[in-house]
Image: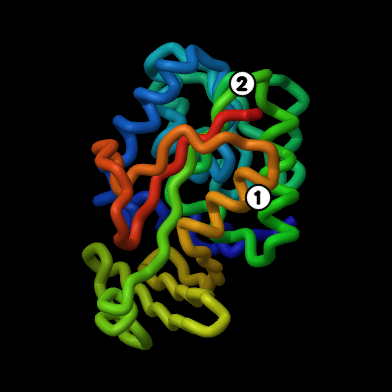
Amino acid sequence: MSSPYDAIAELYDPWSASVVEDVGFYLEEARRAGGPVVELGVGTGRIAVPIAADGIRVIGVDSSRRMLDVCARRAALAGVDLDLRAGDLRDPPVRERVPLVICPFRSLLHMHTDADRRDALAAVRRMLRPRGRFVFDVFTPGADDIALTHDRWLEREPGIFELARWDEVARTLTLTVRGPDGETTMALAWLSPGEWRSLLEDSGFEVEACYGWFDRKPFTGGDDSVWIARKG
């Protein structure tokens, strides 16, 4: 199993260094659930390590083995244990039943079709205990963001550049990331908030909240949406 993230596993942490606003939010949700927590798209442990440091067991799933290797190193440096497993969001290798599944940093946008999304949501339901919760965040790009970034190399972090190519008809983002330690191209697919709500409800979830940001302000439009859904 290969992943576009394999090529930037060593680049990922410096690339995402400024992304910190969601850590406290997911840690709060993990404390509320009490654990264990399944994190889908665990990556290098940006969210999982702080949760584990709080004494909560984390099962981390990712399709990139190289990202999991970096995550294991990061956990060891922090002195925490993570249960890391290579697998796909549509069929994660988790047989445990947990009170909380999280999927941070827009990882669900790697699901390109409704069939993929429904398979992923069905997998989440299988992992959840009765009335367990699924918490995730996604984006729906605005016209301003597309106009500012389309087909332009932009320096995201020092020495790390991104090229975004937006297709508003197909609703896909083809993103190239380039830095001194690697380069990769990946494709993401977005939906409207209304479509996410319908998918969740059709998949057997009750939407408890949809926030516009990690400060829990209600969603009133905008690029980002943060969802809390309960297994029905």
Percent from the top left, x then y, of residue 75? 46, 28
Q: Nearer the viewer, residue 180 or 3?
A: 3
In the drawing, does residue 120 fall left or right of residue 24?
right
Name the amino acid type tagged 1. Ser
Percent from the top left, x then y, of residue 145? 29, 74
Q: Residue at x 46, y 31 (%)?
A: 48
User: Which residue has dot 2 on it?
Assistant: 131
Residue 11 numbered tag: none
User: Which residue has dot 1 on it?
Assistant: 63
Q: Is residue 7 above or below residue 51?
A: below
Residue that protrudes farthest toward the bottom in the picture: 151
Q: Residue at x 68, y 37 (%)?
A: 204
Helix, strand or loop at disc 2?
A: strand
Q: Are marks 2 and 1 in contact (CB under 8 Å)?
A: no
Percent from the top left, x then y, of residue 218? 29, 43
Name the amino acid type tagged 2. Arg
Helix, strand or loop at disc 1?
A: loop
Query: Of marks 2 and 1, which one's residue comes earlier in the chain?
Result: 1
Q: Residue at x 33, y 62 (%)?
A: 223
Q: CA distance from mark 2 to mark 1?
A: 27 Å
Q: Quadrant of the N terminus?
A: bottom right
Answer yes or no: is residue 70 visible.
Answer: no
Q: Which one is in front in this view, the residue at disc 2 or the one at disc 1?
A: 2
Q: Nearer the viewer, residue 219 or 125?
A: 219
Q: Nearer the viewer, residue 189 or 142?
A: 142
Q: Quadrant of the C terminus?
A: top right
Q: Nearer the viewer, residue 205 or 121?
A: 205
Give neighbour class at mark 2: few <14, some 14-19, many 20+ (Cα, 10 Å): some
